[in-house]
Amino acid sequence: MSKRILPLAAMEKILKQAGADRVSDKAKVALKDVVEELTEKIAVNSVKLAAHAGRKTVKEGDVKLASKQQ
Amino acid sequence: MSKRILPLAAMEKILKQAGADRVSDKAKVALKDVVEELTEKIAVNSVKLAAHAGRKTVKEGDVKLASKQQ
């Protein structure tokens, strides 16, 4: 679905902050792919929860509940 | 740890792609926080797996295995 949304530089930054000395290019792409997939799942569930509550606007509580249901 | 790494605009885009008509500002922030936390967990685990394999470079396989261990 959304495969060019999160910046690769952010993935490298998070891995470095986690203690990585070096990070391969493929590792950055792998992290981006995994995180985008997780984000999409939470987003889809958030939209369903908003609809379930009779709203067209996705709110904070939808995202928080969705993230716990993964 | 890394609380201003992922762009809020990307969170809105992913929620819109998931079918959201409207997204509250707090919902974008909530999604960013949740996703950053997940990313950090995977990153920390990736670094441990690279070290476990005797490497200083985090590679694709570390990230893939780490993401399955969440």
Image (cartoon, coloured by chain):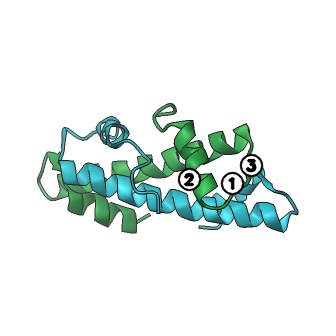
Chain colours: A cyan, B green
Q: Is residue B18 left or right of residue B27?
A: left
Question: What amino acid does circle 2 point to?
Answer: Ile
| Disc marking residue B14 | 2
A43 or A12: nearer the viewer: A43
Label 2, secondary structure: give it.
helix
Asked if labels 3 and 2 share a chain, the reply is yes
Q: Nearer the viewer, mark 1 or mark 2?
A: 2
Q: Residue at x 88, y 63 (%)?
A: A54
What distance separates the C-alpha of mark 1 from that of mark 2? Answer: 12 Å
Asked if labels 1 and 3 share a chain, the reply is no
The residue labelled by disc 3 is B22
Q: Is residue A15 left or right of residue A41?
A: left
Residue A49 on image: x %, y %: 76, 64
B41 or A41: nearer the viewer: A41
| Disc marking residue A63 | 1
Q: Farthest residue in the right direction?
A: A54
What distance separates the C-alpha of mark 3 from that of mark 2? Answer: 12 Å
Q: Nearer the viewer, mark 1 or mark 3?
A: 3
Instruction: Give neighbour class at mark 3: few <14, some 14-19, many 20+ (Cα, 10 Å).
Output: some
Label 1, secondary structure: give it.
helix
